[in-house]
Amino acid sequence: MTIEPLEQTADGIDDRMRELASLARLVTYARNSAKDLKVESPTYCLDLALGLLLEELSKCGVSDVEGIDRDESRSGFTSGLPH
């Protein structure tokens, strides 16, 4: 059975969203661990990474991912540029 190009594209987008969501959960865990250890630079960098991942997810139409604290990740992040 041959998969139509449109289906391949939709499957690819679903895979991309799943991978981005997995990365966002991983970065959330790492950021929270760094925060608990009170290491500021890694926490800041991971917060930026999480913000960028959330922007990519929103471009894919994903507004909520379980296991990610969206509000906290945006506290020092606006439009892709650090304050």
Image (cartoon, rainbow, N blue to C red):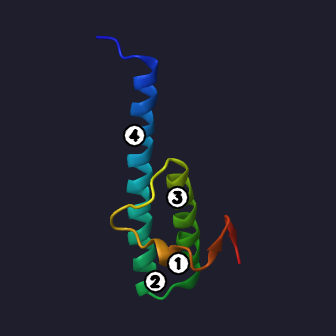
- Left or right: residue 10 compared with residue 75: left
Mark with earlier residue (4, 2) = 4
Q: Name the residue under label 1.
A: 43
Q: Which residue is drawn at 48% across and 50% down?
A: 61
Q: Horizontal and vertical percent for residue 83?
A: 71, 78
Task: Give the amino acid type for the residue marked by disc 1 in the picture.
Answer: Thr
- Left or right: residue 73 compared with residue 18: right
Q: Horizontal and vertical percent for residue 62?
A: 45, 53
Most foreground residue, 47 or 7: 7
Q: Mark 4 points at which residue?
A: 14
Q: Distance between the residues labelled 4 and 1?
A: 29 Å
Q: Residues within 10 Å of mark 1 (few under 14, many from 20)?
A: many
Task: Give the amino acid type for the residue marked by disc 3 in the picture.
Answer: Leu
Q: Do the residues labelled 2 and 1 touch (CB within 8 Å)?
A: yes
- Relative to 62, residue 74 above or below: below
Q: Mark 2 points at which residue?
A: 35
Q: Which residue is drawn at 38% across and 63% down?
A: 25
Q: How crowded is mark 2: few (under 14 residues within 10 Å), some or many (20 or more)?
A: some
Q: How far apart are marks 2 and 3 (CA)?
A: 19 Å
Please state which of the two labelled residues, at mark 4 or mark 2, is closer to the viewer.
Answer: 4
What secondary structure is found at the residue carrying circle 3?
helix
Please state which of the two labelled residues, at mark 3 or mark 4, is closer to the viewer.
Answer: 4
Q: Horizontal and vertical percent for residue 29?
A: 38, 71
Please state which of the two labelled residues, at mark 2 or mark 3, is closer to the viewer.
Answer: 3
Q: Name the residue under label 3.
A: 53
Mark with earlier residue (3, 1) = 1
